[in-house]
């Protein structure tokens, strides 16, 4: 990324980031990746890869959330997978073809780290423990996509909406999800009016509250009860394959604290290392970011949609 697109993060942002996949690595494996890690800010709406794009980096979100969406020929969209601090993207589809499956778009702005794909491949080949963890994550990711596809086909939009709100809530340290009805409609592949009806119903039930800045989760347990089984199935796979790397359900307990597996080297890296930025923006998605022209940090510095 050209240097003019970089910008040091604020101290508050610099002290917070973490990625639980990296944090769960043994010190030796993390030391292999550390020289290659580049810290970034991912502005809302940034398209990191379009379908068929060559993949150059593996990304490890900290507090950013990225969605993989399938783009139809008529422009309609549907989310296939979500990536946050529990994992990584830009690797599973890059083992052979090195091409992106779909559009990778930032739905929640925040920080992340990335590693050049060649360095990632070399590290995986040379370090069996890292390779096992990557394979475990890939299996969990495939399970997420598997359940999401089935969910989109058979479950009512109300239950799917609850699943999506919970999945986003899992990856944030706040109860307000900064999303518009339009954005949520694109994620779920339904009309905006449908989302408005569903959210009104959830608000009437006091599960959420719609605010100027987004959707506030009032009753997480109630949302889990209202969600379809797919949310629990996806959580089960992550908890089984990658213990401690997925978000904790009890936000008041340890969800926002450093996970037990966090290694000192990884923690120190994120505290001491400044993050490059592809934009100074940390705006929330306020409109239909997914349908806009793509911007790629590798080729377009200061991407801003
Ligand atoms: Zn479902």
Image (tube, grey):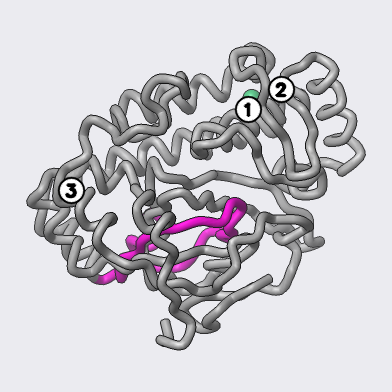
Q: Provide residue 119's location: percent of width, then percent of height.
A: 22, 69
- Foreground of the two, 170 or 296: 170
Query: CB of residue at label 2: within 8 Å of ligand 1?
Result: yes
- Foreground of the two, 46 or 93: 46
Query: CB of residue at label 1: within 8 Å of ligand 1?
Result: yes
Q: Residue at x 78, y 55 (%)?
A: 76
Location of residue 226 with respect to 109 vertically, above or below: above
Residue 25's quadrant in the figure? top left
Residue wearing tag 2 = 159
Image-based side of 173 in relation to 212, left or right: left
Q: Which mark is residue 163?
A: 1
Q: Provide residue 251's location: percent of width, then percent of height.
A: 47, 24
Image-based side of 60 in relation to 209, left or right: left
- The local crowd at label 3, few if under 14, some if 14 to 19, many if 20 or more residues have their Cα within 10 Å, is many
Q: Residue at x 59, y 51 (%)?
A: 108
Residue wearing tag 3 = 130
Q: Residue at x 59, y 59 (%)?
A: 105
Residues at marks 2 and 1, CA–CA distance in whole angstroms = 6 Å
Location of residue 137 with respect to 272 vertically, above or below: above
- Quadrant containing the C terminus is bottom right
Residue 13's quadrant in the figure? bottom left
- Foreground of the two, 48 or 4: 4
Q: Over which residues does the magenta segment extend? A: 92-118
- In contact (CB < 8 Å): disc 3 and disc 1: no
């Amino acid at each position: 990324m050209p240097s003019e697109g970089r910008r040091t993060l604020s101290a508050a942002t610099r002290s917070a980031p973490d990625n639980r996949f990296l944090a769960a690595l043994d010190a030796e494996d993390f030391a292999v990746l550390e020289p290659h890690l580049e810290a970034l800010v991912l502005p809302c709406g940034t398209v990191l890869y379009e379908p068929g794009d060559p993949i150059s980096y593996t990304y490890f979100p900290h507090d950013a959330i990225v969605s993989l969406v399938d783009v139809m020929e008529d422009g309609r969209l549907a989310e296939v997978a979500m990536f946050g601090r529990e994992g990584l993207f830009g690797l599973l589809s890059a083992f052979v073809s090195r091409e992106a499956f779909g559009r990778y778009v930032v739905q929640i702005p925040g920080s992340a780290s990335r590693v050049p794909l060649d360095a990632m491949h070399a590290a995986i080949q040379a370090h069996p423990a890292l390779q096992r963890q990557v394979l475990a994550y890939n299996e969990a990711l495939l399970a997420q996509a598997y359940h999401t596809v089935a969910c989109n086909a058979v479950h009512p939009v109300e239950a799917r909406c609850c699943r999506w709100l919970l999945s986003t809530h899992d990856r944030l340290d706040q109860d307000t999800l900064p999303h518009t009805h339009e954005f949520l409609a694109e994620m779920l592949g339904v009309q905006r009016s449908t989302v408005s009806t569903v959210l009104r119903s959830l608000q009437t039930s006091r599960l959420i509250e719609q605010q100027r800045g987004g959707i506030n989760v009032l009753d997480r347990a109630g949302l889990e009860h209202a969600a379809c089984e797919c949310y629990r199935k996806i959580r089960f796979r992550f908890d089984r394959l990658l213990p401690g790397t997925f978000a904790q359900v009890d936000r008041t307990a340890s969800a926002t604290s450093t996970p037990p597996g966090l290694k000192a080297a990884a923690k120190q890296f994120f505290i001491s290392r400044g993050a490059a930025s592809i934009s100074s923006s940390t705006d929330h998605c306020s409109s239909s970011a997914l349908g806009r022209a793509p911007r790629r940090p590798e080729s377009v510095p200061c991407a801003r949609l």
